[in-house]
Each structure stands twice: as C-alpha cells, then as structure tokens.
Image (cartoon, helix red, strand yellow):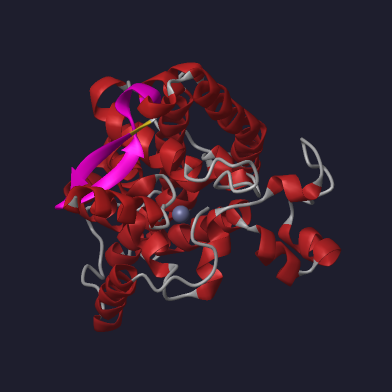
C-alpha cells in the first residue's frame, strides 16, 4: 500500500527537467576535451572533473537569476515558418525589430553563445585560468542546449499536445539509458569556426526543423505501444519514480533514427570547436603558463549559492527549456 501511495505521489509531482539533463551536459563537456589539439588537451584534460561538474551551473543559476532562463532556448516557431527569415540573425537588428523584452520572452540562445565566445576569448587573452575553465564549462552548456530540438520550440515539453514529460524524455532518459551502452562517441577533431555566428544559427535551425519529428514520433510510438508498457517505476535514492520504460525508450531512439545520439555527437564537436576557436582567436596562448588559478571568494560563494538554490528548487521563470 505504501508503495502504491508513494508511486502515485511521484506521478503527481511535476517533472523537473534540465537541458540535456545533468548527465548529458556533463558527458558532452567531458568528451569534448578529447577533440582538442595537444596544446589545449594538455591543460583541459587535467580539468575534466571541473568541466563536467560545472557544465550544469547555468541550469542551477536559473534558480537565482531571472534573466538566466532565456539564454537556454529560442522559440523559433514564434517567428513564423522554417527557415524563420523574419527573425534577424544580428542582435541589434533583432532588437530594433522586436525589442529586447520581446526577444527575451522567447529565448536568446544563439546570441548568448556568441557573447560567451567573446568572454572566453578574452579570458584566453588574459591567460586567466579560472575564467577559462568557468567560461569553457558554461559555453559548453549553452551550445549543447542549442542542439536540443525542443529548445527551439514553444511546445517545449509537449504541453500543447498532451505529451508532458517529452522534454526530459528526449534529453535525459534516452541518453542516460543508451549513451554509455550503445552511442558511438568517436568523433574526430575540433575545427576552427570562421563564422561561429553562422555555425550556431545553423544548429538552432536544425533543432527547429527536428522539433516536429521529436513530437510526432513519440505520438506514433505511444499509439502503437501497449499502454501498460510505456512507463515503468525505478527506485531513485529510495524514491519510486515513474520513468519511460526501457523498451519504449529504445524504440523511440530507433524511430528517431538515432537522433539523440547524432545531436549529442554534434554537441560534443561544437563545444570543442568553440573552445578551439576562442583559443585561436586569442592568439593561441601557452596554456602551460596561465595565471589566476584560484577562484575568488565571491566566485566560490556563487557556486555554493547556485547549488543551494537548486537544491531548494526556487526556480525563477520557465522551468523546462
Ligand atoms: Zn540549459
């Protein structure tokens, strides 16, 4: 009886989801390190634990900072139909056309990635180790978010189509279940991006184009799948949690022709390429001779505060996507 009550309680809880899930973001930053050239690898490899741990800071910060939310998504479908030419790719032109408030209301991820690239490039020029690490971890997060199809759709959690939970399903459940077992992460090398602005816009446009498939395939599979086998219960830290079943999850990724794997691979490549581009644009500083290795007391306090806010679940603004 207790189990049943607990199960019902868990089903009633709103599903909190984080872009790519914590697992996915950590994995993407970690694997991106190994696409870097030797001059960068020698430094980044030592700091894999930091880059993985802090890959999720931007999500944690959403609890403390209202303006953080829009940096993780862009509701492309708010701007008409693919390829959304009504929306200027240049920030100033977009502000002139729609106003900053309106842009913020529908997400700004491709522009924010470019801001982060400038900041990371500056940190390389200054040879500031703590800034390089913090900004590398964080830009990895935003780039990866831009690769998630439901981060480019206003129906970001299937809330308009009766598919509530699909956000976390695509970006958390699928990779958590399948990445270590069957995804191929042999990706090659980071590339220098001559036009990082065009590159990140191309990725978010791909996400926008794929969003419909993400939703449609789940709908079709639900209709074809035995209703009592779509979900299962798993014990997580002593709590019984309702999850999409393994069979449903595997079938979904198959129906998507490996889309989650493909987008995860592309995220890893993109993160490494942005890190590499920032380093090249900063004049390829010697990463064996950096300064500013320590985080300031304020920065350390901020890390702890984001963690606390996240644990307490005081999110400001949109929780999912
Ligand atoms: Zn995010």
For the point 42% across and 76% down, the residue is 64
Is residue 21 shown in magenta? no
Residue 130 lies in quadrant = bottom left
For the point 32% across and 49% down, the residue is 22
Horizontal and vertical percent position of residue 230 = 40, 29
For the point 33% across and 74% down, the residue is 309
Residue 193 lies in quadrant = top right
Residue located farthest toward the front when viewing the structure as drawn: 1
Q: Nearer the viewer, residue 308 or 237?
A: 237
Residue 283 visible, this orientation: no
Q: Nearer the viewer, residue 26 or 287?
A: 26
Looking at the image, residue 129 lies above or below residue 238: below
Horizontal and vertical percent position of residue 306 = 33, 72
The main secondary structure of the magenta stretch is strand
Q: Nearer the viewer, residue 32 or 65?
A: 65
Horizontal and vertical percent position of residue 122 = 46, 63
Looking at the image, residue 62 lies above or below residue 114: below
Horizontal and vertical percent position of residue 301 = 26, 80
In the picture provided, is 84 more to the left or to the right than 244? right
In the picture provided, is 17 more to the left or to the right than 77? left
Highlighted magenta segment, given as a residue range = 232-249
Q: Nearer the viewer, residue 29 or 38?
A: 29
Residue 249 visible, this orientation: yes
């Amino acid at each position: 009886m207790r189990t049943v009550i607990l199960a019902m309680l868990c089903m009633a809880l709103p599903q909190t989801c984080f872009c790519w899930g914590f697992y996915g973001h950590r994995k993407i930053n970690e694997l991106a390190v190994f696409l870097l050239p030797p001059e960068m690898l020698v430094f980044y490899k030592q700091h894999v634990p930091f880059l993985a741990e802090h890959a999720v800071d931007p999500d944690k910060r959403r609890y403390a900072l209202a303006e953080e939310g829009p940096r993780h998504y862009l509701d492309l479908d708010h701007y008409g139909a693919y390829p959304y030419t009504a929306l200027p790719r240049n920030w100033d032109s977009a502000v002139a056309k729609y106003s900053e408030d309106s842009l913020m209301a529908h997400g700004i991820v491709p522009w924010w990635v470019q801001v982060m690239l400038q900041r990371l490039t500056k940190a390389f020029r200054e040879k500031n180790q703590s800034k390089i690490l913090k900004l590398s971890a964080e830009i990895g997060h935003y780039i990866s978010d831009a690769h998630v199809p439901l981060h480019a759709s206003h129906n970001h959690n299937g809330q308009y189509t009766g598919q509530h939970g699909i956000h976390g399903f695509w970006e958390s459940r699928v990779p958590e279940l399948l990445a270590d077992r069957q995804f191929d992460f042999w990706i090659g090398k980071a590339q220098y991006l001559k036009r990082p602005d065009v590159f990140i816009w191309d990725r978010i446009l791909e996400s926008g184009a794929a969003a419909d498939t993400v939703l449609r395939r789940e709908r079709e599979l639900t209709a074809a799948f035995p209703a009592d086998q779509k979900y299962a219960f798993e014990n997580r830290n002593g709590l019984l949690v309702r999850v999409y079943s393994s069979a449903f999850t595997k079938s979904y990724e198959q129906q998507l022709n490996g889309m989650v794997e493909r987008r995860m691979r592309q995220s890893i490549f993109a993160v490494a390429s942005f890190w590499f581009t920032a380093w090249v644009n900063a004049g390829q500083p010697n990463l064996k001779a950096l300064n500013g290795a320590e985080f300031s007391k304020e920065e350390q306090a901020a890390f702890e505060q984001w963690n606390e806010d996240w644990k307490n679940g005081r999110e400001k603004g949109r929780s999912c996507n």
